[in-house]
Each structure stands twice: as structure tokens, then as C-alpha cells.
Image: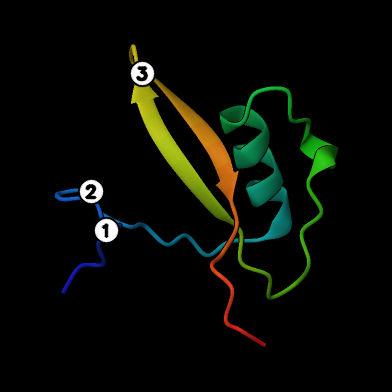
């Protein structure tokens, strides 16, 4: 069963890769964010919301919901 984002018809996608690819992807998707501006810790999850506007993708880093610890 595919994961869903909570918005009708919008899938949630999970990508597992190494830090360099994560830094590159975020620097291309998030305005004014450079390659070295993102710290990637081994085992860390980074959540990004993608929106499509005028044939381009734009990203925004999103916090994970708290777990009440």
C-alpha cells in the first residue's frame, strides 16, 4: 500500500541516499540554500515538501511532528 501525504491523491516519497546527494538535492530545490548549508548526520531523516509551479519544483524543509518526549 503506498504512503500518502494526508492530501488527497498526493503520494509521500522516501529516498535513502548519502549526504552529498542530499545536500545537492536540497541546494537545487530550496531557494538561497547552498550545498554546504545543510548538515547531514548519518542516520538522520530530512523532510522536504515539494510544490510544482510553472514547470519547476520548489522545496521547503519541514519539521517532523513532535513525539511528546
- Identify which residue, 9 or 68, lies in the foreground: 68
- Identify which residue, 34 or 24, lies in the foreground: 34
Above or below, 64 relative to 62: below
Query: Residue 53 got which mark?
Result: 3
The residue labelled by disc 2 is 10
- Point out the image quarter for the N terminus: bottom left
Query: Residue 51 got which mark?
Result: none
Q: Are marks 1 and 3 in contact (CB under 8 Å)?
A: no
- Camera-side mark, 2 or 1: 1
- Identify which residue, 16 or 66, lies in the foreground: 66
For label 2, the crowd category at 10 Å Cα-Cα, with few meaning under 14, some 14 to 19 and many 20 or more, is few
Q: Secondary structure at mark 3?
A: strand
Q: Is residue 1 left or right of residue 67?
A: left
Q: Secondary structure at mark 2?
A: loop
- Point out the image quarter for the C terminus: bottom right
Q: Name the residue rendered at 52%, 35% in the picture.
A: 59
Compare marks 1 and 3 and give the one earlier in the sequence: 1
Q: Secondary structure at mark 1?
A: loop
Q: Is residue 11 left or right of residue 64?
A: left
Quarter holding residue 37 = top right
- Camera-side mark, 1 or 3: 1
Compare marks 2 and 3 and give the one earlier in the sequence: 2
Q: Position of residue 18 (x, y in %)?
A: 66, 61
Q: Position of residue 49 (x, y in %)?
A: 46, 44
Q: Name the residue rendered at 42%, 62% in the picture.
A: 14
Quarter holding residue 42 = bottom right
C-alpha distance separating marks 2 and 1 = 7 Å
C-alpha distance separating marks 2 and 3 = 15 Å
Q: Which color scheme did the rendering employ for the protein?
A: rainbow
The residue labelled by disc 1 is 6
Amino acid at each position: 500500500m503506498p504512503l500518502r501525504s494526508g492530501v488527497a491523491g498526493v503520494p509521500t516519497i522516501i529516498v535513502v541516499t548519502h549526504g552529498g546527494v542530499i545536500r545537492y538535492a536540497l541546494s537545487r530545490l530550496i531557494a538561497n540554500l547552498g550545498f554546504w548549508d545543510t548538515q547531514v548526520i548519518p542516520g538522520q531523516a530530512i523532510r522536504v515538501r515539494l510544490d510544482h509551479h510553472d514547470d519547476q519544483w520548489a522545496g521547503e524543509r519541514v519539521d517532523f511532528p513532535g513525539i511528546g518526549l
